[in-house]
Image (cartoon, rainbow, N blue to C red):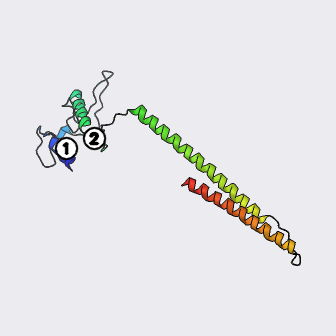
Amino acid sequence: MSSMKDLLEKMDDKYPFAGEKATPPQKPGDQVRGTDKAPKVKRTVPYQKHPFQGKLVGGAAEESVEHIADQFRKELEEYGAPGSGISSGTDMDRTQVRQIRRDQKAQQQQVDAQEDNIERQIEQLKGQILAIKKAPTPIPNPNDIASVQQFAGMNREKKAQITQLSQQIKQLRSQMS
């Protein structure tokens, strides 16, 4: 809020608010509308003045380029870059900022590549789990105790393998987040 107050206080009296009297009184010919047509003038010099030069609103014709540049430098020193709320108190130049952005982009690409790699590993582990689940197991003979024990042992081994692969998947997912 205070910056708005500062700006209003620093405003020049040459540019009054609506309804106030302008210090150099404006004449009807001082302003140019978008519908006004420029008079056709035969070119006499390669670089002649624009037909509306000096008639544009704002009085830019009255101020010199050096004066405007000095005002701009002062505003930059006080308020920072135009259009931003951040002050110009940074010591980095554009090449340093570009290098930092390149480094950040490279790091992000590395992270993305690692995540893609982890996702591929997870898909491979899921494929292994599916293959273990679909692996054929011999049907046990209920009358033969050895075949029933062999069937139970194979099922325990399958469950252990699936549990181990599931734990690996959990570890990989925790690395991603």
Q: Is residue 146 left or right of residue 78?
A: right
Q: Which residue lies furthest to the top in this view?
A: 45
**Residue for point 79% across, 66% down:** 154
Question: Observer-nearest residue: 172 or 154?
Answer: 154
Q: Position of residue 24 (x, y in %)?
A: 12, 37
Residue highlighted by disc 1: 7
What element does badge 2 sit on? loop
What element does badge 1 sit on? helix
**Residue for point 86% across, 75% down:** 145
Identify residue type, mark 2.
Asp
CA separation, marks 2 and 1? 33 Å
Residue neighbourhood size for the residue with mark 2, other residues' Cα within 10 Å, grouped as few (<14), some (14–19), many (≥20) = few
Residue highlighted by disc 2: 36
- Residue 143, compared with residue 99, is above or below; it is below
**Residue for point 59% across, 47% down:** 114
Q: In this view, does 166 lie to the left or right of 82?
A: right
Q: Are marks 2 and 1 in contact (CB under 8 Å)?
A: no
Q: Residue 162 carries which label?
A: none
**Residue for point 66% across, 52% down:** 120
Identify residue type, mark 1.
Leu
Q: Position of residue 16 (x, y in %)?
A: 14, 44
